[in-house]
Image (cartoon, rainbow, N blue to C red):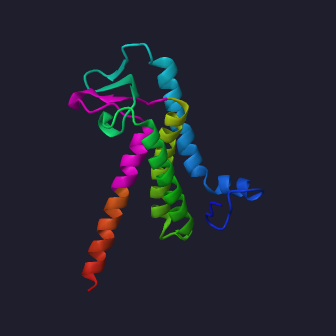
Amino acid sequence: ILVTGGAGFIGSNFVHWVVEHQPAVHVTVLDKLTKYFAYTGLRGTDGIDIIKGILRLEYLENRGSAFGMMQNQKVFFIIFTLIVLVIMALIYGRVPETKRMAPLRAVLVMLFAGALGNFIDRLTHTFVIDFIYFKIIDFPIFNFADICIVVGAFLFASARGEHECSDSESV
């Protein structure tokens, strides 16, 4: 049983769990919607310039991880991501629902939802749908879930660094 915030994932507590975790559900749904639009609107096209020479929407089926590394390792990614999702859910369930801990809970929601969005792609396809391309710097094509993961990881690292600095200053 996945226990989060005192609500189990089985039986009548399922509705409570979904309501309690609706930010992750909303972010995941937004990710899936953007990928649906990329799949139906960009697949088979040359893409769309949003800002010519700078930002494009371009359909890509990524069968690897970040930057296209580890191509065609679907089983590895599914198992690894499932483990990470369970660990994040367990950590989230142990973080107190206080104002002080709200930023950590938000970061965990971003990380969880981003990982879940790409996980769903891997389960339903043999690839992750990427479609955002910063042409000006030739950055690898990515998606909304990737943004959530990178921003969440950056915020977590920043908060961790601030916490370590404030601990050393109080000595």
Q: Residue furthest right?
A: 12
Residue 8 figure quarter: bottom right
* In the rendered image, the vertical position of residue 167 relative to residue 158, given as above or below: below
Q: Is residue 137 magenta?
A: yes
The answer to whether 38 appears left or right of 53 in the picture is right
Residue 52 figure quarter: top left
Q: How many numbered tags mark residues here?
A: 0
Q: Residue furthest top?
A: 45
* In the rendered image, the vertical position of residue 45 relative to residue 121, given as above or below: above
Instruction: Please name the residue shown 39% across and 24% down the image.
Output: 60
Residue 48 figure quarter: top left
**Picture quarter with the C terminus:** bottom left
The answer to whether 66 appears left or right of 9 in the picture is left
| Spot occupied by residue 51 in the image (x, y as percentages of width and height) | 31, 24
* In the rendered image, the vertical position of residue 21 relative to residue 124, given as above or below: below
The boundaries of the magenta stretch are 126-154
Instruction: Please name the residue shown 45% across and 30% down the image.
Output: 127
In front: 124, or 4? Answer: 124
| Spot occupied by residue 126 in the image (x, y as percentages of width and height) | 47, 29
In front: 91, or 138? Answer: 91
* In the rendered image, the vertical position of residue 24 relative to residue 61, given as above or below: below
Instruction: Please name the residue shown 33% across and 37% down the image.
Output: 70
Q: Residue furthest bottom?
A: 171
The answer to whether 74 appears left or right of 139 in the picture is right
In front: 39, or 74? Answer: 74
Instruction: Please name the residue shown 73% across and 53% down the image.
Output: 15
| Spot occupied by residue 99 in the image (x, y as percentages of width and height) | 51, 69
Q: Is residue 61 magenta?
A: no
In front: 64, or 130? Answer: 64
| Spot occupied by residue 80 in the image (x, y as percentages of width and height) | 44, 48
**Picture quarter with the N terminus:** bottom right
